[in-house]
Image: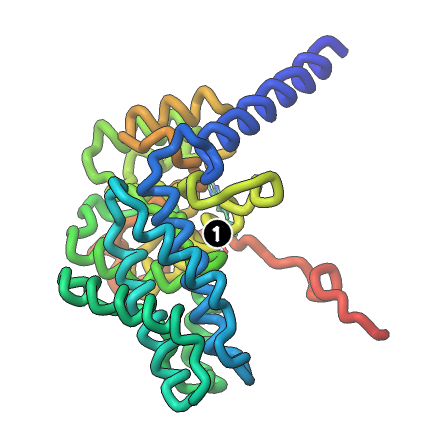
Amino acid sequence: MFRRLAKLLQMLFEYLHDMWQFTRYNSHSPLQPRSKRIGFHTVIETHTLEKGLALPKPRPFFGLLKIKTILRMQQQKGVERELFPREMLLGALAAYLNWHKEYPDKPQEVIDQIKNFIEVERAAGVTAVGGVREVSPPINDLAAQQFLQSRYSSRIFDEQILPQALVEQIVLLAQKAPSQCNRQSSKVYVFSAKDKIDALLELQGGSKGFSHNVPTLFIVTSEITAWGGPQQRNQLYVDGGLFAMQLMLSIHAFGVLNCPLNLAVSNSTEATIKKLADIPPSERLIMMVAAGFPSPASEGAALTVASSPRRPLNEVLYTSRN
Ligand SMILES: Cc1cc2nc3c(=O)[nH]c(=O)nc-3n(C[C@H](O)[C@H](O)[C@H](O)COP(=O)(O)O)c2cc1C
């Protein structure tokens, strides 16, 4: 009885700590740097312009108020502006002007503001990366289905560390994960020093029996400042989880073995991991992923992994009949 009560109290304490962290680092917190808050805000609002242009029938001159707000935000004096939001905004505004170029009755004041902003940004050497793009429709791709079927968690790796160039290719592909309003709050930290991995996995606790042979370790995190307000309090885990999934698929796609590792830890253990891994306090840990090549000795041979059978479909899929 006493043990149960202690657990409940501990849970309350952890939740209070979660609440404090979100309040302290979310995008409405005045304690967070203005440039970072403006950066995320710009990306989020700019994406609404991109989305507007990608609708079946965009409403002519939609979002003018929004555009004014973004421009005002970007033109605030004395704030260092992050490059990526500027590039994305430049692309979206150029696409917005382009889409409206045939319209006769333009709201000239805002259009001039946009043109002026684009000119200044281009003169400053900013490149445009946002807007809309043409894509091919998805195809019924058997190879892709087989690839998705073929993913598994492996707990046996060769000792060879993943080369940095490969890590970069893996993470670039993982970045294709969708994120809410394209804010991309997820980050990846990669480790290959044995001592560091040993210490991190000791704190993780779920890799007993194979932690000693993990050659490369990824930690996925999500930036709290990308999120703001009470409704978004848990969303960083949604985006972070999706990113982690794409990271695992990406690792698999490059012919590398991996195993997801939970970070179901207390706030104090999370703080210790962050300190050890040099992860800023404004980020929350999502999970770790152990990765490595199959042993060359096993070439061609089957690898042994846990079966992890799946539940029957009728326990997972509920199709609405009305
Ligand atoms: C978020 C998450 C955390 C996990 N944590 C661990 C872990 O700490 N240790 C471990 O050996 N496996 C861990 N796993 C792997 C699961 O056991 C495995 O994904 C599951 O059994 C399904 O098997 P499969 O990945 O081979 O399809 C984790 C998986 C997920 C998604």
Task: Using the image as rendered, state which of residue 270 and residue 290 is in the foreground.
Answer: 270
- Position above or below: 297 against 59: above
Outermost residue to the right:
322
Q: Is mark 1 within 8 Å of ligand 1?
A: no
- Using the rendered view, name the quadrant where residue 106 is placed: bottom left
- Position above or below: 221 against 305: above
Where in the figure is residue 231, as x and y percent of width and height? 62, 44
> Could you tell me if residue 1 is visible in this image?
yes
Is residue 83 toward the left or the right of residue 235 in the image? left
Outermost residue to the top:
2
- Position above or below: 39 against 126: above
Where in the figure is residue 183, as x and y percent of width and height? 42, 54
> Could you tell me if residue 154 is visible in this image?
no
Is residue 93 toward the left or the right of residue 122 in the image? right
Is residue 8 toward the left or the right of residue 153 in the image? right
Where in the figure is residue 92, as x and y percent of width and height? 36, 70
Where in the figure is residue 11, as x and y percent of width and height? 63, 22
Residue depicted at 41% across the width and 83% down the height: 100
Q: Secondary structure at mark 1?
A: helix
Q: Quadrant of the N terminus?
A: top right
Task: Using the image as rendered, state which of residue 118 and residue 267 is in the foreground.
Answer: 118
Q: Quadrant of the C terminus?
A: bottom right
Residue depicted at 29% across the width and 42% down the height: 189
The residue pinned by badge 1 equals 239
Task: Using the image as rendered, state which of residue 175 and residue 22 is in the foreground.
Answer: 22
Mark 1: which amino acid? Asp
